[in-house]
Image (tube, rainbow, N blue to C red):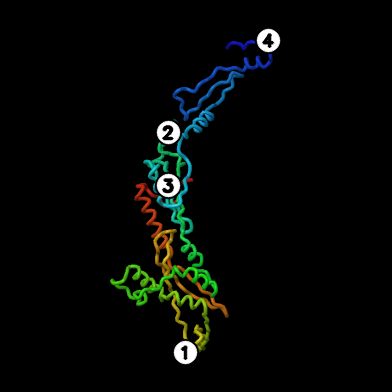
Amino acid sequence: MAEKPIYTMENPAQTMRDVMEEIGGSEHIAAPTDFDLTKAHVITIPEKRTVADLTKYHRDAAEYLKPARRKGTARFDDLESLIMWANRFKGETSALFAKPDMTAPTLNCIADYHAQGPVTVNTQTGDPTAMHCNHRAIYNFPLSDEWKAWMAISGAALDKDEMGEFIEVQAKDIMDPTPAVLRGQPSDNNEKWENKLIETAHQIEGRYGQLTQLLAMSKKFQVFETSDLKVATNRDTGEAEIQFLNEHKDADGQPLKIPNLIIIAIPVFLGGALYRMPVRFRYRKSGASVKFILSIYNPEKAFEASFEEAITVAKEQTDLPLFLGTPES
């Protein structure tokens, strides 16, 4: 290795800056014409032969001019937009993921999802089926205001005023039972949804009521409790059994006969189709106070049907495999 030259200031007018410029000078090193961003680009620096890795700078420069790969997450406000996005960017490895969460349902599309097949790791090139999974789209299903309102009070104990206010606000959601539903007899002449409501009433021993009945009860509803003493004697042993039988009656002293089911027709998702669902109506008396309880009967069925309809549309219009669950993070 040749020794470094010794610099002397033969010309007194020469400045130290000129000396340092000459010492630190180096030839321009251009990137090769077939520069590969996947490989390191290493050069040596004259001062003490320091090795510098320029790979990051080359990659940053290349990313500034043009991204090396697609990445980012798009968030859409309607299902159609996610379908259009999926069809625009999908490839052989793209996939859909649906999360049927009743409080926050989502549909995801990963354009660069892993390819199918077992993992085969190559020490030189890695797993040929692995992808970055960085190009994504998410659609958060918007639950309807009606669905959120009814689910919020379902099963909660409301006093008379609370129930009255809720019924008045959501009166548009309540539908009166049809004559077929009131008759309570399944028939081929009935609509399918009518027979389903009738079957539900039979299963839970329910009677359907009307909106006017609910409104009337929310304005003036009194429960009078009477207790009757019942004594039963066993003639063989002479033992006596005493029971107090409590019965709820109205202001006229007649046994209470109130409907314990109503029908609501609401969409699960914003702008979606209406689903008819029975709502169980109960009251609970504790001392002088009365609490009302409205509970949607089996809301999971309506949610599952609405969610299944939406993801089926996405699957058919994108022709992509669909998985129920959450993708790898």
Distance (Cα) linking label 1 and label 2? 88 Å
Q: What secondary structure is marked by label 3?
A: strand
Q: What secondary structure is marked by label 4?
A: loop
> Which dot, 1 or 3, sits closer to the camera?
3
Q: Position of 22 compared to 254: left or right?
A: right
Distance (Cα) linking label 4 and label 2? 57 Å
Name the mark on residue 8. 4
Q: Earlier in the sequence, mark 1 or mark 2?
A: 2
Q: Earlier in the sequence, mark 2 or mark 3?
A: 3
Q: Earlier in the sequence, mark 4 or mark 2?
A: 4
Name the residue type under label 1: Asn
Q: Earlier in the sequence, mark 4 or mark 3?
A: 4
Name the residue type under label 4: Thr
Q: Are marks 1 and 4 in contact (CB under 8 Å)?
A: no
Residue where numbered disc 3 is placed: 109
Give x and y (percent) for residue 26. 57, 17
Q: What secondary structure is marked by label 2?
A: loop
Q: Are marks 1 and 3 in contact (CB under 8 Å)?
A: no
The residue drawn where x is 57% and y is 12% is 1
Name the residue type under label 3: Cys
The residue drawn where x is 62% and y is 18% is 24
